[in-house]
Amino acid sequence: MAMGSLKHVAFILFFWFPSLRAEETASSQRCDFPAIFNFGDSNSDTGCMAAAFYPEVLPYGETFFHEPVGRASDGRLMIDFIANHLGFPFLSAYINSIGTSYRHGANFAAGSSTIRRQNRTVFEGGTPFTFEIQTQQFNQFKQRTEKFFNQGRRNSFERHFPRPEEFAKAIYTFDIGQNDIAAAINNVGKEDSNKVISDIVDYFANQVRNLLGLGAKTFWIHNTGPIGCLPVSMPIHNAKSNVTPVEGYTDQNGCINYQNDMAREFNKKLKNIVVKLRAEFPHASLIYVDMFSAKYDLISNANKEGFVDPSEICCGYHEDGYHLYCRNKAIIKGKEIFAGSCDDPSKYISWDGVHYTEAANRWIANKILNGSFSDPPLPIAHSCHAQ
Ligand SMILES: *[C@@H]1O[C@H](CO)[C@@H](O)[C@H](O)[C@H]1NC(C)=O
Ligand SMILES: *[C@@H]1O[C@H](CO)[C@@H](O)[C@H](O)[C@H]1NC(C)=O
């Protein structure tokens, strides 16, 4: 006891003067994450929707994988750069039962997913794998993994699943909300947007509470991006809009202001709820990542950063008022047109009008991984230290 308290005193004395250094030492220690568990929408789906429903086709995947791999991009997504940065292989989609390993985590993200429940079937562009279902799937993944290990089936399980004790040490990453905001944008004027956004954020917080209750400790939470900057919403690509935009409708980048404002409102409320969750769970480490600003920086500096105009789309057809989504075919002026991809996707920010190219994802990942867009400002490799 005496020895212990003496050591304690010595510790305090030793580190008292350079107290800043002591603090830095604690938080500059790399976290020993054994696994990643990711939740989200198409921004981080690494094969869920493709495995569950219809596989993707080229040119999706053409740049990096040279084949379609269930990602809504020409190559790697932000979650791929995150996984590699932390020393992990690419994350397998939980729903993908063929040739996959979950040794270092699983990806529950699904294209079209929302935080709230949704009414659309997959045939109408929806998904059954909403955020609530994703956390439920994680719960099942964890319980069944633990059960098999406890039944002494270690040997056959060890190669492809995390150890039961690794769930609490893992990093939990999130990128979801964009499709909820898209739905809210469609309903502008029909519902109270402010109330809807509060509702979305409350749903999010409740699922995070569920994960905290299951023992998750480190959370890396992306806010939602500038949805009004997606080329499909911009007036020049929006086949439906014959309106001449009024003054202030778009910003200097051609992004739609009121849509970005809704994303900003969501982000403000999301940040507030993260602060609240920190107070509720003081031993957890919750990092809020300002993805909006990272993406907006790229969009605002596109040319300076070596990209074409941010309204340009690599895969798709956009001419003479005709707009075809990537990979679609149509007869235009008597000619069959196929909406294929551009010659050099690395020059584009937008892959298909909705999703980012690998080049943009890499640029954004480089910006966010070192903590310059995080609150508190911790790099992802140190993100377990935000208590
Ligand atoms: C789904 O439909 C129900 C019943 O029509 C409605 O109350 C609810 O708001 C809808 N949900 C969404 C997310 O649109
Ligand atoms: C993080 O990396 C970006 C891009 O390389 C750089 O601009 C920024 O200054 C870095 N920030 C920190 C805190 O190291």
Image: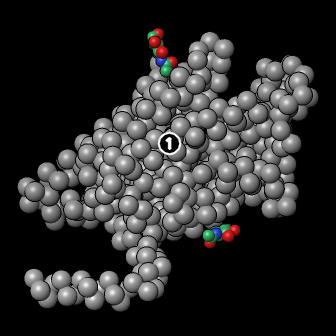
Residue 324 pos. (x, y %): 76, 30
**Ligand 1 has an atom within 8 Å of the beta carbon of the residue at disc 1:** no
Residue 59 seen in render? no
The residue that appears at 37% across and 49% down in the rendered structure is 279
Q: Residue at position x 10%, y 57% from top?
A: 150
Circle 1: residue type: Asn
- Find ligand 2 in the image and state its quadrant: bottom right
Whether residue 172 appears in this view of the structure is: yes
Q: Tell me what residue is drawn at x 61 percent, y 51 percent.
A: 291
Instruction: Determine the image quadrant of residue 158.
Output: bottom left
Looking at the image, residue 197 lies above or below residue 56: above
Q: Is residue 270 left or right of residue 52?
A: right
* Nearer the observer, 253 or 140: 253
Q: Is residue 258 left or right of residue 322?
A: left
| Pick the front one: 70 or 337 | 70
* Place of residue 10 in the rendered image (x, y in percent of width and height, measured from the top left): 28, 89
Total numbered labels placed on residues in the image: 1
Image quarter in which the N terminus is found = bottom left
**Image coords of residue 30 (percent x, y):** 42, 74
Q: Name the residue tied to disc 1.
A: 272
SS for dot 1 = helix
**Label 1 packing within 10 angstroms: few (<14), some (14-19), many (20+):** some
Location of the C terminus (image quadrant): bottom left
Along the line of sight, the residue nearer the viewer: 92 or 62: 92
Colour scheme shown? one colour
Q: Is residue 42 above or below residue 336?
A: below
Give the answer, above or below, for where 382 lies relative to 51: below
Q: Position of residue 213 (x, y in %)?
A: 26, 45
Name the residue at 86% across, 42% down.
252
Q: Is residue 211 left or right of residue 250?
A: left
Q: Is residue 238 above or below residue 205?
A: above
